[in-house]
């Protein structure tokens, strides 16, 4: 998505943020994930509709038992072949969350997690139609905490607005972000700011250590953030995470993708957070 497409865009601005205090300890909490990356379990559901000019507002339910082989990506603007397509944990850290459950750092991982293709210039359909459906499922699974991760600029806004709606339903949320200004304007209830590339906000592919560290910080800040709309910035360097990834997977630079949905009419470009 080129900058010119967003130049005259009117961004959401909120003056305050909803708030649901998590009364129980995080070790007693059940946790779910939501991403705006357009992930879907290709054996069970179809891809997102990339031909939709406004952006497909539907969602996909992703079971906690999902594997990398079971995941595909259909995103309207971003080429995620070198990130989520290699290791979905860099933006959707289900495996790290399951490890924390085994270590009893949380009570349980939700039976299901959720994905939308959040890069939409009009998020009304997602907020008014999709989010209430997701909230009902979160309530069904007795989820206490939701960690929400966007991809691009519009995905950040969609994620922030989703967080607000979920918090209004009395489920505590925290958003991971690389774009501070959007979060300051849209005001999700709680935000962790990480200066990492789009699609890799939990760390580089195969860098399980950093992925888990950032996820742990999310859960810590569910309790430590006390002001609605507060943004806590983590002092982490992307090059350190990438260096760890290369140790774990020396051929990372040469890995190729074959699982990305393509569309001749879709403009997919790599965009760095520094441009916004």
Image (cartoon, grey):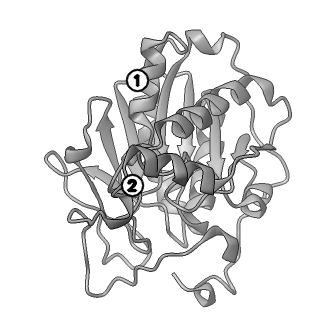
Residue 100 in the figure: left or right of residue 227: left
Please tell me in which quadrant of the rendered image residue 20 appears.
Answer: top right
3D distance between C-alphas at marks 1 and 2: 18 Å
* Nearer to me, 221 or 32: 221
**Classed neighbour count for the residue bearing mark 2: other residues with Cα under 10 Å, few (<14), some (14–19), many (≥20):** many
Q: Is residue 238 visible?
A: yes
- The disc placed on residue 158 is none
Residue shown at 47%/55% (left/top)? 36
Residue 250 placement (x, y as % from top left): 37, 53
Residue 229 placement (x, y as % from top left): 80, 43
The residue labelled by disc 1 is 98
Q: Is residue 161 visible?
A: no
Q: Please tell me whether mark 1 sits on a helix, a strand or a loop.
A: helix
Considering only order in the chain, which callout, 2 or 1, is on the residue closer to the N terminus? 2
Residue shown at 62%/55% (left/top)? 238
The residue labelled by disc 2 is 84
**Classed neighbour count for the residue bearing mark 1: other residues with Cα under 10 Å, few (<14), some (14–19), many (≥20):** some
Residue 18 in the figure: left or right of residue 74: right
Residue 189 placement (x, y as % from top left): 73, 40
Residue 181, placed above or below residue 97: below
Please tell me in which quadrant of the rendered image residue 197 appears.
Answer: bottom right
* Nearer to me, 181 or 238: 238
Q: Quadrant of the C terminus?
A: bottom right
Residue 39 placement (x, y as % from top left): 34, 53
Residue shown at 25%/75% (left/top)? 262
| Tags 1 and 2 touching, CB below 8 Å | no
Please tell me in which quadrant of the rendered image residue 185 appears.
Answer: bottom right
Residue 12, placed above or below residue 22: below
């Amino acid at each position: 998505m080129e900058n010119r497409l967003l130049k005259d865009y009117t961004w959401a601005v909120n003056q305050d943020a909803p708030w649901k205090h998590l009364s129980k300890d995080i070790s007693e909490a059940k946790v779910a994930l939501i991403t705006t990356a357009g992930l879907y379990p290709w054996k069970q559901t179809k891809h997102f509709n990339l031909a939709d000019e406004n952006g497909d507002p539907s969602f996909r339910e992703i079971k906690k038992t999902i594997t990398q082989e079971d995941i595909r990506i259909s995103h309207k603007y971003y080429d995620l072949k070198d990130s989520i397509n290699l290791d979905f944990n860099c933006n959707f850290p289900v495996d790290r969350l399951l490890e924390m459950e085994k270590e009893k750092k949380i009570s349980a991982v939700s039976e299901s997690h959720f994905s939308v293709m959040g890069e939409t210039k009009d998020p009304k359909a997602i907020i008014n139609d999709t989010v209430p459906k997701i909230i009902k499922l979160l309530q069904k699974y007795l989820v206490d905490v939701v960690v929400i991760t966007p991809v691009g600029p519009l995905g950040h806004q969609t994620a922030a607005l989703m967080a607000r709606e979920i918090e209004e339903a009395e489920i505590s949320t925290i958003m991971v972000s690389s774009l501070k200004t959007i979060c300051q304007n849209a005001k999700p209830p709680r935000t962790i700011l990480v200066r990492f590339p789009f699609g890799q906000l939990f760390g580089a592919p195969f860098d399980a250590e950093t992925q888990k560290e950032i996820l742990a910080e999310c859960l810590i800040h569910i309790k430590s953030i006390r002001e609605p709309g507060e943004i806590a910035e983590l002092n982490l360097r992307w090059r350190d995470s990438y260096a760890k990834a290369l140790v774990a997977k020396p051929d990372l630079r040469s890995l190729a993708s074959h699982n990305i949905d393509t569309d001749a009419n879709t403009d997919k470009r790599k965009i760095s957070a520094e441009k916004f």
